[in-house]
Image (spheres, helix red, strand yellow):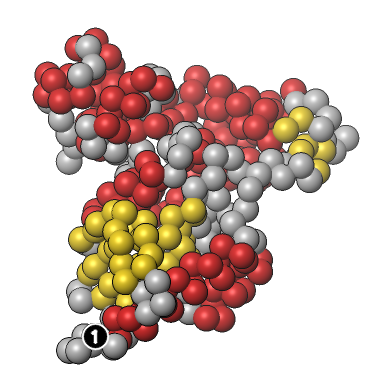
Amino acid sequence: MAVDIVKASGLPQKFDMRKLADSLMRSGAPEEVALDIARKVEKKIPQEASTKAVFRMAKRLLRRYNRVSGMRYSLKNALYALGPAGYRFEKYMARILRAHGYSTEVDQIMDGYCVKHEVDVLAIRKGEHFVIECKYHSDGGTATDVKTALYVHSRFVDIRKACDLKPGHPAGVHYGMLVTNTRCTTDAIKYAECVGLRVMSWKYPEKESLERIIEGRRLYPATILHSARKRTLEALFSHDIILAQDVAGMDERVLARRSGLDHETARVLKREAEELCPCE
C-alpha cells in the first residue's frame, strides 16, 4: 500500500522510494545501498509521517554505511542550522563566492538613486558587480516568494540607477541576485527570469543551484559536522571559521588556539572535517 507523507509546507504527498534513493546516491551512497535504505524506510514509516521523520530514518541508516555520506546527506539541515539570524548565511555565501573567484564584502551600505541600501553581499568578478540579497529560512516549509523577488529587484534598480549616473562609471556592470537556502516559488522564479534578476536557491537553477555549487567544491558549512554543537559553532563562527574546509585545513593546535575550543573538541572536529573534505 502506498504511504502518504507530509511535506514541511504541511501538504501531503506519496512517498517516492526512487526519489529517496536518488537523494542518498547524491550523498555518495552506491545505488544498491541507497535502494536498500529506501526499501527499509518504506517498510517502517507510518502513514502521514513528516518528511523530517523520513530524513532522520534515512540518515540514521546511511550513517551505518558511511559517516561521510551521512554528513553530506545532512546538507539541507546544515544550512538551516546557520541561524537563528541570517548573518551567518550571508558570511557563508560570501565564502562560497570567494572560492569561485569573486572578491566579496558583506553588510555594505550603498547609495541608491532614491535612498541608501544595506547590501548583504557585494561580489565582484572580472569587473562585474553583483548586488546580492541573502534570504535565510530556518526550515524548508517557507519558500521564498515573489514579494521577496520584487523587493530585491527594486533595490537593485535603485542602486544601478545611482551607479549609472556617476561620472565615468561604465554602464551595465551591476547585476542583482537573490540567494536563498530554500526553494523559490514558481512566481518568484517567473518574475526573476522576466526582469533578469539572478537567483540561486535549492534546486534552482538546475546546473548552478545552491546544493550543486556547494557539492562541486565541497564548500560545506561547519554546521554539517556531526560533533559541532551549538557552543562549538558559536566559537567557530565568531572567529570566522565558516567552512568544514577551514577546519580540515587547520592544524589541530591552531584550531584550538584560534577558536578557543578545548583540544579534544578540536581534534574530533578536525577528524570529521578531514573525512568530509580531504586536503588534496
Q: Can residue 278 be seen in this view?
A: no
Q: Is residue 115 above or below residue 215?
A: below
Is label 1 in a helix, a strand or a loop? loop
**Total numbered labels placed on residues in the image:** 1
> Residue drawn at (27%, 49%), measured in percent from left and top?
95
In the rendered image, the residue lying farthest to the front is 115
Which quadrant, please, contains the N terminus?
Answer: top right
Quarter where residue 23 is shown? top right
Left or right, 21 with respect to 265, comes to right
Tell me where residue 232 appears, x and y as whole percent: 33, 21
> Residue drawn at (77%, 37%), measured in percent from left and top?
5
Residue 59 vs residue 76, the one in the foreground: 76
Tell me where residue 266 appears, x and y as whole percent: 23, 18
Quarter where residue 32 is shown? top right
Left or right, 54 with respect to 181, comes to right
Residue denoted by label 1: 166
Q: Is residue 226 visible?
A: yes
Q: Is residue 276 above or below residue 110?
A: above
Residue 61 vs residue 136, the one in the foreground: 136
Left or right, 221 with respect to 2, comes to left
For label 1, count other residues whose C-alpha is less than 10 Å away and answer few (under 14), some (14-19) or many (20+).
few
Quarter where residue 259 is shown? top left
